[in-house]
């Protein structure tokens, strides 16, 4: 079977990279889009497909010493060891609006394609969690699987901000991918390639378009088996949960706080009327059950 990424890659000529580069990101922030774009500017035999992690830094030291591979990608949280490791690379950090990251993360784990071997997917299926419940778990965190959204972005994004990395937002990347004919797109990708010390070829638009083609991405919804929940906003209850958990996260990441506030409308998850959704409570001294008001 032909690898669609490699097939697209063979349409271009490639010069050896001048330096090692690493495309670091918070998971579900568009990692594959960025990796596939930069891949179109990199010789195939210089791409290291296994991703480094905090647990495998020692193994990658040998890979770095060999100096064969030049392009890496991964989801690397900040730590003293990671800071030392990153000195070997030109570092790009990809972030995303945390509301969209939460929805994408929940969508990934709630989808039908998750392997039966995944402990988390079994947990979700065994407990028959609906999509909003999974979103709630992603916001607050789930022991043994992942931290809550605030800590997630602090450790995997904000802690890197003073490290000299080149920070890009998924929304900006996607905007310029969709508007390659505009001069702003040339400026944008010129700055990105310049940080990676990659010369900008005359066919850069064709390379970016090839790397951004959703047909070659294994994580695009159209390439994933099973149903995908395509909801774009949080439920009212999860809006309140997000506000309680990460009230200043958008501001810390450099996102428009007014736009975020519109997506976190603070609408109550209930209408103030009595409702049968709440359990009947036994109150001492009474001979009848009392229905708790919502």
Image (cartoon, rainbow, N blue to C red):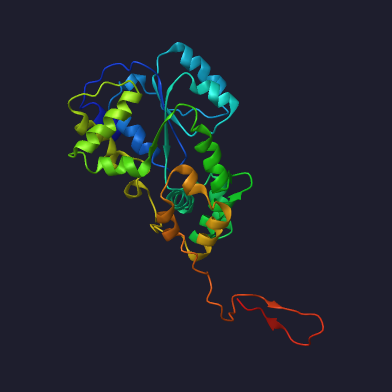
Q: Report which quarter residue 215 is drawn in.
A: top left
| Residue farthest bottom in this picture | 287
Quadrant of the drawing holding the N terminus:
top left
Tell me if 279 is positioned left or right of 158 in this view.
Answer: right
| Residue farthest right in this picture | 285
Residue 224 percent across, percent down from the top left:
37, 48
Quadrant of the drawing holding the C terminus:
bottom right
| Looking at the image, residue 84 lies above or below residue 75 | above
Tell me if 39 is positioned left or right of 258 in this view.
Answer: left
- Total marks in image: 0
Q: Residue at x 70, y 83 (%)?
A: 290
Given residues 146 and 122, the one toward you in this image is: 146
Given residues 172 and 223, the one toward you in this image is: 172
Residue 65 percent across, percent down from the top left:
48, 12
Q: Residue at x 42, y 55 (%)?
A: 258
Q: Residue at x 52, y 69 (%)?
A: 268
Question: Does any portion of residue 152 appear in the rendered image?
Answer: yes
Residue 57 percent across, percent down from the top left:
55, 23
| Looking at the image, residue 12 lies above or below residue 260 | above
| Looking at the image, residue 257 lies above or below residue 174 | below
Tell me if 190 is positioned left or right of 225 in this view.
Answer: left
Given residues 4 and 203, the one toward you in this image is: 203
Question: Does any portion of residue 1 appear in the rendered image?
Answer: no
Tell me if 224 is positioned left or right of 286 in this view.
Answer: left
Residue 281 percent across, percent down from the top left:
71, 77
Q: Residue at x 53, y 73 (%)?
A: 270
């Amino acid at each position: 079977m032909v690898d669609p990424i490699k097939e697209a890659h063979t349409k271009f000529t490639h010069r050896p990279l001048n330096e090692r580069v690493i495309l670091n990101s918070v998971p579900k922030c568009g990692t594959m889009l960025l990796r596939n774009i930069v891949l179109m500017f990199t010789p195939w035999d210089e791409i290291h497909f296994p991703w480094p992690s905090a647990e495998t830094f020692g193994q990658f030291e040998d890979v770095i010493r060999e100096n064969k591979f030049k392009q890496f990608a991964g989801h690397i949280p900040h730590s003293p060891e990671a800071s030392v490791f990153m000195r070997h690379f030109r570092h790009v950090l990809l972030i995303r609006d945390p509301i969209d990251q939460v929805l994408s993360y929940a969508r990934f784990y709630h989808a039908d394609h998750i392997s039966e071997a995944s402990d988390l997917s079994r947990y979700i299926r065994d407990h028959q969690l609906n999509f909003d419940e999974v979103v709630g778990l992603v916001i607050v965190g789930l022991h043994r699987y992942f931290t809550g959204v605030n800590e997630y972005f602090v450790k995997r994004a904000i802690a890197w901000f003073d490290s000299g990395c080149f920070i890009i937002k998924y929304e900006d990347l996607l905007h310029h991918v969709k508007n390659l004919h505009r001069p702003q797109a040339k400026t944008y990708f010129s700055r990105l390639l310049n940080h990676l010390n990659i010369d900008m070829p005359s066919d850069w638009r064709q390379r970016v378009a090839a790397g951004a083609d959703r047909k070659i991405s294994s994580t695009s919804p159209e390439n994933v088996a099973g149903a995908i929940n395509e909801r774009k906003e949080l439920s009212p209850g999860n809006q309140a949960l997000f506000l309680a958990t990460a009230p200043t996260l958008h501001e810390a990441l450099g996102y428009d706080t007014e736009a975020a506030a519109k997506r976190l409308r603070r609408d109550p998850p209930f209408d103030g009327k009595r409702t049968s959704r709440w359990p009947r409570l036994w109150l001492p001294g009474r001979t009848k059950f009392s229905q708790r008001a919502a």
